[in-house]
Image (spheres, helix red, strand yellow):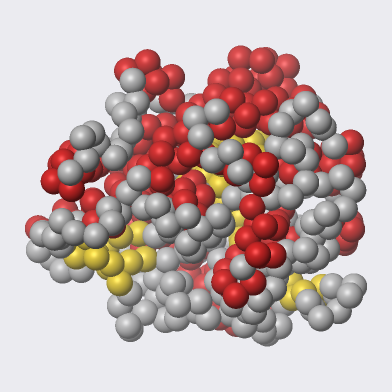
Amino acid sequence: MERYGTYGKLNSNEFPGDFLLGTATASYQIEGAWNLSGKGENIWDRYTHTHPELILDRSTGDVACDSYHKYEEDVALMKKMGVQFYRFSLSWSRILPTGFAYQINPDGIRYYNDLINLLLKNDIIPLVTLFHWDTPQPLEDLGGFTNALMVEWFEDYARVVFENFGDRVKLWLTFNEPKQTCHEGVGGDNKAPGYESSGIGDYLCAHNLIKAHARAYHLYDKEFRPKQNGSISITIDTSWMEPGTNSTADKEAAERKIAFNFGWYADPIFHPNGDYPEVMRKLVPERSKKEGFRRSRLPEFTKEEVKYIRGTFDFLGLNHYTTLLVKDIPEIPISGKPSVDKDSRTESWHDPSWPPSSAGWLKVVPWGFTKLLVWLKHRYGDVPIYVTENGFSDLGEIDDQGRVNYYKLYLSAMLDAMYEHKVNVKAYAAWSLVDNFEWRDGYVNRFGLHHVDMNDPGRKRTPKASAEYYRKVIAARKIHGID
């Protein structure tokens, strides 16, 4: 199997002059202040409070890094590293406590105004995500993204956001990682709300979420872009899917896996033809019929919807961490509950020789990053790519050489794609600025460039070795540590 790049040779090219280097966080993971200053309840508040046993250390995001009160210190950390942009998300429930736009929380507006203004004062570009998994609980009680009315409710929320912050924010993301919201949160139980409705609920969730993205894009494009002159898109995550063997069956399985993993959300927006990947439109109806369903479990877009959704991007947001090996499963018995995994007819795993992180799902496979970026160019054309998350987990070490090594290898792999394969990557955000609430992992697995003492009421921040390493990379505009 072809491998791009090597572990021993780092790319010595400089980042282009217009390339942006930054870092990222998400509201629920860092803000805390879960019920202060008018904020409403969201699904992660409910999930962690009612099912503490599902969180590895039984923790919550109630206080988290307390960034609601310590945002000035966080901006100072970024300034010291020299980052050019900060990708953060807004808490829908902090802005609209009920989820609906009839009630706007002035303290929520004030908090994000203060953060945005301070970033700009420090020459840090805000890249703002409207939604990072934290659906307002009152809307979830009405079905969340399985309810088609969420398309309208999200558009209402987006309007409030653009009206209040769009004069200063010029880079927008509608959604972060729809796969986690829909496939893992609705289809599975690995994320809130944990409905375990794979093969039905996750398809319905994704269908409405993609339409909500398009509505927000067209709203911005028509009513706000003429005056605010910003850019807007969506961030989608995926591992690279490498064939388990050189067999034709496994090569096709790897393509199928990335179609069901990434193309599901990306093709309707970024592919020249729009709509869901052809393989999904073929396999899901076939299996649905065999299972006894009267119609496909995969909803269909109308021709008008395909046209409305297609092209609703100014760049492609990408989150990437690791690689999987994939093999073909030619026949899956028609029994039990339906699922997306059964529909895709694939099985995936890690090569045991790949270097590990503290999280079982994350192995260090930098050449997979290069291959993914090249694949994106071939599938979607020369679209500008913003890498909005990439990072490494450990157990909280201050001298985090594993993370330093990960950044060296992955930044090199990204430069390989840019210089050797002419992939149009425009920005890179290291995940994450600070150790934070890592969803089901609680505070066990850490991704931060800065250590946060979760036992300290003041949530003391301490720079790690990776923060200093990243500072040197940003200052030199090239990978630090090349002999």
Residue at image position (41%, 45%) is 201
Q: Quadrant of residue 23?
A: bottom right
Residue 165 x, y percent position in the rendering: 78, 32
Residue at image position (78%, 46%) is 40
Query: Would residue 48 be visible to someone looking at this image?
Result: yes
Q: Is residue 87 above or below residue 64?
A: above
Q: Nearer the viewer, residue 350 or 398?
A: 350
Residue at image position (33%, 33%) is 299
User: How many callouts does the rendering have?
Assistant: 0
Quadrant of the image containing the N terminus: bottom left
Residue at image position (36%, 23%) is 306
Residue 269 x, y percent position in the rendering: 42, 32
Q: Is residue 232 above or below residue 34?
A: above
Residue 482 x, y percent position in the rendering: 53, 73
- Residue 195 is left or right of residue 74, and the answer is left
Q: Is residue 253 above or below residue 448?
A: above
Q: Nearer the viewer, residue 344 or 204?
A: 204
Query: Would residue 404 be visible to someone looking at this image?
Result: no
Residue 150 x, y percent position in the rendering: 56, 32
Q: Is residue 138 above or below residue 32?
A: above
